[in-house]
Amino acid sequence: MHKEKEKDIEKKLEEEQELDDVVKEDNALEKEEIDESDKIELTKEEVEAMNKKINDSKELYLRAQAELINYRKRKDEETSRTLKYCNENLVSEILPVIDNFERALSSKSSDQKLLDGINMVYGSLKNILIKYGLEEIDSLDKPFDPSYHQAVTTDNVEDKDDNIVLEVLQKGYMFKDKVLRPAMVKVNKIERNDK
């Protein structure tokens, strides 16, 4: 008897569920009918105005997107340039130390062990700087180039071509692809006698 009651209850629950589903379907259909009746009739001018607004919004969006892309590119280039030359100031400040080592090595000292020690320190320091992008500008017997050389004095040597570097008074250096310090040089200037 108990099982029969359970079956009856289950059957009634199923019927109620079916009724709920039918009511939900009817409500959905009524809502669709209401939605269809609520549709707004637009004039041709209103449609054109809306299309213009849509196109203007698209254009603004595309411009903003292009500006963002350009901004990112500029920032990436600036960051890579900053990273590339981040050691430039440090290397520039070490150049006078290199000059002093070279002066010490060219001096006439009787203490060979001292000169050997100075030479070792100089070589180590120079190798480190070269590893990080320092490069000496080769100037001697090369044509004078104001991009790489600073003419401090001139001389008149007949057996050399005009505008040739005769002597390097202070070495010049490049850091990566940039002139860090131009070489101070003596340049040959041949005097022409146009009589």
Image (cartoon, rainbow, N blue to C red):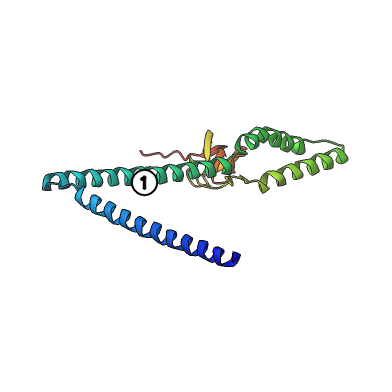
Q: Quadrant of the N terminus?
A: bottom right
Which residue corresponds to the image point at 11% horizontal and 48% vertical from the top-left? 44
Which residue corresponds to the image point at 86% horizontal and 37% vertical from the top-left? 110
Give the image location of residue 20, x and y in percent: 40, 57
Q: Which image quadrant for residue 122?
A: top right
Residue farthest along the left direction in this orientation: 44
For disc 1, the neighbor class at 10 Å (few under 14, some 14 to 19, many from 20) is few
Q: Which image quadrant for residue 173?
A: top right
Front one among 78 and 151: 78
- In the rendered structure, the answer to whether residue 67 lies left or right of residue 189 reads left
Look at mark 1 in the image and give the residue it sits on.
66
Give the image location of residue 127, x and y in percent: 71, 47
Does the image show residue 155? no
Q: Is residue 179 above or below residue 93?
A: below
| Secondary element at image label 1 | helix
Looking at the picture, which amino acid does disc 1 mark?
Ala
- In the rendered structure, the answer to whether residue 98 lies left or right of residue 72 reads right
Give the image location of residue 169, x and y in percent: 61, 36
Does the image show residue 147? yes
Q: How many numbered circles are shown?
A: 1
Give the image location of residue 194, x and y in percent: 37, 39
Front one among 117 and 158: 117
Q: Which image quadrant for residue 97?
A: top right
Q: Quadrant of the C terminus?
A: top left
Which residue corresponds to the image point at 70% horizontal and 37% vertical from the top-left? 98
Which residue corresponds to the image point at 59% horizontal and 47% vertical from the top-left? 138
Front one among 168 and 4: 4
